[in-house]
Amino acid sequence: MAREYDAQLLESVAVRRNRMRESLLWGRERRARATMDNLKRLGISVVLAAVACAGCVGWSLLQEMLAEREQRFSSPVSMTVPDVTVTPATVRL
């Protein structure tokens, strides 16, 4: 009989811990949430994901532009004149 009581006590403690964990994670009225609340959260999540994607694209564009600018200014600009030789065969009047 004592073992049954111990098993029952351990099970009730485990159930209480699970309920406490769920209430900590989800709040008091976990089952009473309306669909609109979840849709609002979904909308906010989509907006935040779009902002994060736009930020990543902007950062990548900025890094590419800065790399191009650095490459353009770091390489010496040389003005080369092409060597043009005039031969009688290429001159036509």
Image (cartoon, rainbow, N blue to C red):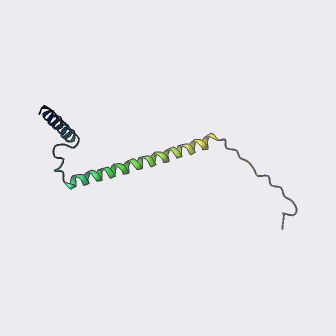
Q: Report the side of 80 relative to 54 (left or right).
A: right
Q: State the image coordinates of residue 9 (x, y, percent, origin top left).
A: 14, 34
Residue nearest the viewer, comparing 29 with 3: 3
Q: State the image coordinates of residue 14 (x, y, percent, origin top left).
A: 19, 37
Instruction: Name which residue lies at 39% across and 47% down.
Output: 52
Q: Report the side of 81 relative to 66 (left or right).
A: right
- The correct choice, above or below, for 11 with respect to 41 in the image is above
The quarter of the picture where the C terminus appears is bottom right
Instruction: Name which residue lies at 70% across and 44% down.
Output: 78
Residue nearest the viewer, comparing 24 with 4: 4
Q: State the image coordinates of residue 13 (x, y, percent, origin top left).
A: 17, 35
Residue nearest the viewer, comparing 24 with 45: 24
Task: Choose top left, top right, bottom left or bottom right for residue 84.
Answer: bottom right
Q: Which residue lies furthest to the right in this view?
A: 88
Q: State the image coordinates of residue 47 (x, y, percent, origin top left).
A: 33, 51
Q: Report the side of 4 relative to 41 (left or right).
A: left
Instruction: Name which residue lies at 73% across and 48% down.
Output: 80
Q: Report the side of 50 relative to 65 (left or right).
A: left
The quarter of the picture where the N terminus appears is top left
- The number of numbered discs placed on residues in the rendered structure image is 0
Q: Which residue lies furthest to the left in this view?
A: 1
Q: Residue furthest front?
A: 1
Task: Choose top left, top right, bottom left or bottom right for residue 15.
Answer: top left
Q: Residue furthest bottom?
A: 93
